[in-house]
Image: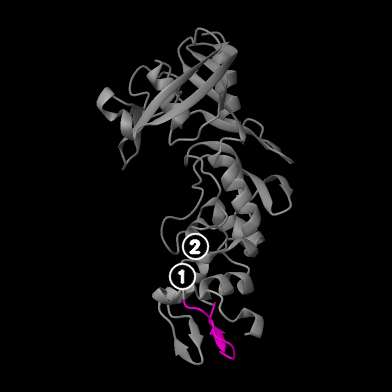
Amino acid sequence: MEPADAGRRLDAFLAERLACSRAASRRLLARGAVRIDGRPLAADAKGVALRAGERIEIDAEGDPEAVVPEPECPLAVLAEGDGWLAIDKPAGTPVHPLAPGERGTALNALVARHPELQGVGEEGGLRSGVVHRLDVDTSGALLVATREEAWRRLRAAFREHRVAKTYRAIALGDVPGDGEVELPLVVARHRPAFVRAAREDELERARTTHTRWRVVERLRGATLLEVETTTGFLHQVRAALAHLGHPLAGDRTYAVAGDETGADRHMLHASKLGFEEIAATSPDPEDFAALRARLRAPA
């Protein structure tokens, strides 16, 4: 340790030297991977002030919360820049693992190509670099940070609703026209997740959401929409359209009856992301385009 580091908090020192988040440095402490003068430290040592002449040893290998790299998993990059990547997430692929050792997520493929994103972000670990999420069966543009400072900038942009997000959706029925809705939503069930409009007595814990849509094409028994959201909430587009009587084709959670489209998953695709220098566009995936074409055909 350099004399100039005397008096610094241990977690801040570790985060700087290891180029990781403070959360990642605290995980190192929690598993006994940090020693001062040969003495192992516990998680509650995060605020310890360093003293001149101390020798700090770090065993940063074998983090049980590290994401397993999967170089064999395909990864389509839509755009990239200083500290960030926008990828094209396939439908059916989770964004990140939920448990140590889990494979088959977008993050497994990402860390295989960009190991530097391990530990990025306050959550770090199994959510390293993740700045926003898409439902497992929602396809399209997903933004990930590969450096800590970029993660902080992008998380702030999402939190302050400064990221432009555009979706394409195939909604059941004949949506009358362009429109928008301000809707207080609550999570009514967690596993599996179910979101609905809040009742009067639930407004205090509800999140007010803003959803705007434009009719792109009228199909047989459905409508192709372009949807923009200024807020971000679990199942926002799916729940808002279902509340209006036009759930998504293939949505087993919200379109419980009357869906004759034959869609294998909910037809929601994150087509565009934009913020400052970031511009990412994802074309309609094959199943989305195929359903659109089928619903155009004469009955």
Helix, strand or loop for disc 1: helix
Residues marked 2 and 1 touching at CB (< 8 Å): yes
**What residue is at 51 percent from the left and 48 percent from the top?**
95
Depth check, front residue: 171 or 59: 59
Would you name the residue on which mark 2 appears? 125
Alpha carbon separation for disc pair 2 and 1: 9 Å
Depth check, front residue: 178 or 149: 149
The amino acid type of the residue labelled 2 equals: Gly
Depth check, front residue: 179 or 92: 179
Quadrant location, the N terminus: bottom right
Residues drawn in magenta: 48-60
Question: In the figure, is residue 58 to the left or right of 88?
Answer: left
Residue 268 higher or lower than 135, as above or below: above
Q: Position of residue 3 (x, y in %)?
A: 65, 85
Residue 80 higher or lower than 49, as above or below: above
Q: Position of residue 181 (x, y in %)?
A: 47, 18
Tell which residue pokes out farthest to the left in this image.
201
Task: Name the mark on residue 27.
Answer: 1
